[in-house]
Image (tube, rainbow, N blue to C red):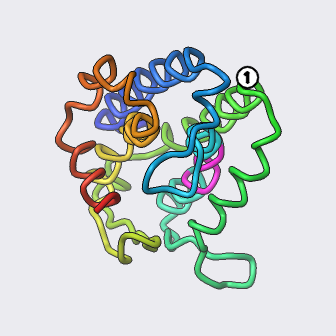
């Protein structure tokens, strides 16, 4: 049975995704291909990232619920290179139209939410092994705390996108007024 503590996470996730999709659809073709300062990605690449990252995150949730190691590994048992994987995913989707990427995002999010709905209170009490990435070291994080921050992934990356869209920052600022989002930006964009 879904933990009652997960329900507000799912609700927040849904609210952010609806706002993120509306924001993405409001972008012009020129805005979508702008390079994002302090990044190797274009604005549209953050949309592709959010369309694809739910696949390994859903696997992490599955492993957490099954009591397995959540430090994602490749088929060969090697550490999962999330940065390389993300770069490949966004490059593969550069030729796709926005609606195709958002449709993929809807499918992957539906699968992730199924995994999220299986999370129990016992799962929330466990520790997540975060494998790390190019900007953050590996760490062990209380899973419940991780979920409360992770559900802000869409606005975290909308804020990244806004660095290339200075004319849109004032309208988006209230969405980003969250200490978790601000902390993420400080950690990732030093």
Q: Residue 162's quadrant in the figure?
A: top left
Whether residue 9 is in magenta: the answer is no
Q: Which residue is mark 1?
A: 99
Q: Position of residue 63 (x, y in %)?
A: 54, 62
Given residues 5 and 181, the one toward you in this image is 181
Which stretch did the figure color magenta? 52-57
Secondary structure category for the residue under label 1: helix
Given residues 187 and 50, the one toward you in this image is 187
Q: Position of residue 35 (x, y in %)?
A: 56, 45
In the rendered image, the quadrant that contains the C terminus is bottom left
Measured along the vertical axis of the image, is residue 111 above or below residue 39? above
Magenta part, dominant SS: helix
Residue furthest right in the image: 95
Q: Residue at x 28, y 60 (%)?
A: 187
Q: Residue at x 41, y 26 (%)?
A: 16
Q: Residue at x 36, y 29 (%)?
A: 7
Residue furthest left in the image: 179
Neighbours of disc 1 within 10 Å: few (<14), some (14-19), many (20+): few
């Amino acid at each position: 049975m879904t933990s009652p503590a997960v329900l507000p996470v799912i609700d927040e996730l849904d609210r952010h995704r609806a706002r993120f999709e509306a924001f993405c659809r409001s972008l012009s073709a020129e805005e979508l291909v702008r390079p994002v300062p302090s990044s190797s990605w274009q604005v549209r690449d953050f949309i592709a990232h959010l369309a694809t990252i739910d696949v390994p995150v859903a696997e992490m949730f599955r492993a957490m619920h099954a009591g397995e190691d959540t430090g994602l590994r490749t088929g060969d048992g090697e550490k999962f290179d999330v940065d390389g994987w993300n770069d490949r995913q966004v490059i593969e989707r550069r030729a796709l139209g926005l609606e195709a990427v958002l449709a993929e995002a809807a499918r992957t999010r539906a699968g992730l939410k199924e995994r999220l709905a299986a999370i129990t209170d016992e799962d929330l009490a466990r520790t997540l092994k975060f494998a790390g990435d190019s900007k953050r070291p590996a760490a062990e994080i209380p899973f419940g705390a991780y979920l409360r921050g992770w559900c802000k992934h869409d606005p975290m990356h909308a804020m990244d996108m806004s660095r290339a869209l200075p004319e849109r920052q004032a309208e988006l600022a209230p969405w980003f007024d969250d200490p978790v989002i601000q902390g993420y930006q400080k950690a990732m964009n030093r």
